[in-house]
Amino acid sequence: MTTSDDHAPHLATHPDRRWLALVLLCLGELMIVLDTTIVNVALPSIKTDLHFGDTALAWVVNAYMLTYGGFLLLGGRLGDLYGHRRLFLLGIAAFTLTSLACGLSTTQSALVIARSVQGLGGAVVSAAALSLIMDLFTEPGDRAKAMGVFGFVCAGGGSLGAMLGGLLTSSLSWHWVFLVNLPIGAAVVAAAWRLVPKAPATATSRHLDVFGAVTVTAALMLAVYAIINGSQSGWESAQTLGQLGVALALLLLFLWIETRVQVPLMPLRLFKLRNLAVANVAGVLWAAAMFAWFFLSALYMQLVLGYGPMQVGLAFLPANLIMAAFSLGLSAKLVMRFGIRRPLAVGLALAACGLLCFARATEHGGFINVILPGMLLLGVGAGVAFNPVLLAAMSDVGPSESGLASGVVNTSFMMGGSLGLAVLATLAEARTQSVWAAGISHAAALAAGYRWAFFAGACFAALGALLSATLLRTAGATAQEQTVTVH
């Protein structure tokens, strides 16, 4: 029986066209990256238009991150079963259609539901795009160049997203931060249909761990919901404790499933590997700090300092440009010179210092003395740490499992970001309400809440730096480092 993939061009015989296929894959990933930063700039406008509460607003970000992280590994598994080209096309189509649904949303629930499905499409696109690049570029030199381009798009897309989000929100409306995906998605689907080669199924087993993906995502969504609503219903209330208890039960069920299924979504045996376990914990702590920084700093600049959306986009520009510069080779050179432990620890320590700069935020905070130093330190810290955290996760596994190890740490990163954002946004809201009740201005109360959250985020990043510096092993990582960084 033939399928659409059987009629797709096989680009192994057209090496020059591989780079056109790479452009399409990067455009698809650019949509996913844009959706992270472009939405942050529009959050205050979304909050006002759809009447979100301060903590409920976090669901606009968390709904996307939870399904993205929860189904990232499943997306890779589906690609192994049914072909990465087919999954890439389906993922782009789903992401584009749900972007339309987000842009047309007029209620809170409609936007959050659309964002959830959008995250599922994004997970499939990211997993398939990386696999297709590995299939297209088999020579080490070409693969290194292709991954460098892909990494630059991922990092540079943050800069573009922040500025584009500011431009669209200020000149049109927040709806357009989602609608801008429509022409990109349509063009990628149309061109990829002919230019991207078929990727034959590589799985030796047809087993699909759907229950694992569903239980872990449900557990995390329920935990985030309980955390976000805990300040309103009471932390010791039966509702909050019950929701946290069910979330814990679902998480334990997920772990039990992973020990029983034939092909687990997240093989628990990997966590016996020291570097992979440490990299995952560091990734969770770092993501908790970084996602909260993106979310809360955008709110601080607009709701407290009175910045317009375009000004917020420009304020993020230094950090995103620095991260993009490191992705083009600076980070790899640091790893080649110093290994993985020191760059990861130093990068997370610099990120902690950047968050401490934001922890000095007041209602009269200035760009030069608060925002710019924080942005520069966070940009350098994130740029230095990103490559080492992935290498640390892969340093104890063989080449055949490097993709799985990378997927596991990326999943941990997204889940840590969701839980961390929920915790720190709730902490900021609780502190704001407490201070506001004492009679100070709303702007000063908001700044007080953000200070607490930024300080807590700095503690998360500092703990990640400490664990990386003391627990990561350097022996055994050398071969993997050389493989990735020699180019």
Image (cartoon, rainbow, N blue to C red):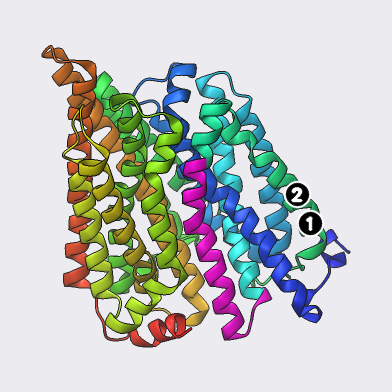
- Tell me if residue 286 comes above or below residue 426 in the rendering: below
Give the image quarter of residue 312: top left
Would residue 263 be visible to someone looking at this image? Answer: no
Q: CA distance from mark 2 to mark 1?
A: 6 Å
Q: Position of residue 248 (x, y in %)?
A: 32, 42
Residue at image point 43% right, 47% down: 216
Q: State the residue in front, 22 or 246.
A: 22
Pick whichever, 296 or 60, lies toward us: 296
Return the x and y of residue 102 as percentages of the image width and height: 59, 30
The numbered mark at residue 191 is: 1
Q: Is residue 344 magenta?
A: no
Asked whether residue 155 is drawn in magenta, I would say yes
Q: Is residue 15 above or below residue 63?
A: below
Which SS class for mark 1?
A: helix
Q: Residue visible at 18% across and 31% down?
A: 362
Amino acid type, residue under disc 1 in the picture? Ala
Task: Give SS at disc 2.
Answer: helix
Image point (44%, 61%), residue name:
324
The crowding category of the residue bearing disc 1, from other C-alpha atoms within 10 Å (few below 14, some 14 to 19, many at least 20), is few
Residue drawn at the location 69% of the way across and 39% of the way down: 182
Residue 187: mark:
2
On the rendered structure, is 115 left or right of 82? left
Q: Quadrant of the N terminus?
A: bottom right
Q: Is residue 423 left or right of residue 13?
A: left
Circle 2 residues within 10 Å: few <14, some 14–19, many ≥20: few
Q: Is residue 273 left or right of residue 211?
A: left
| Magenta stretch bounds | 136-163
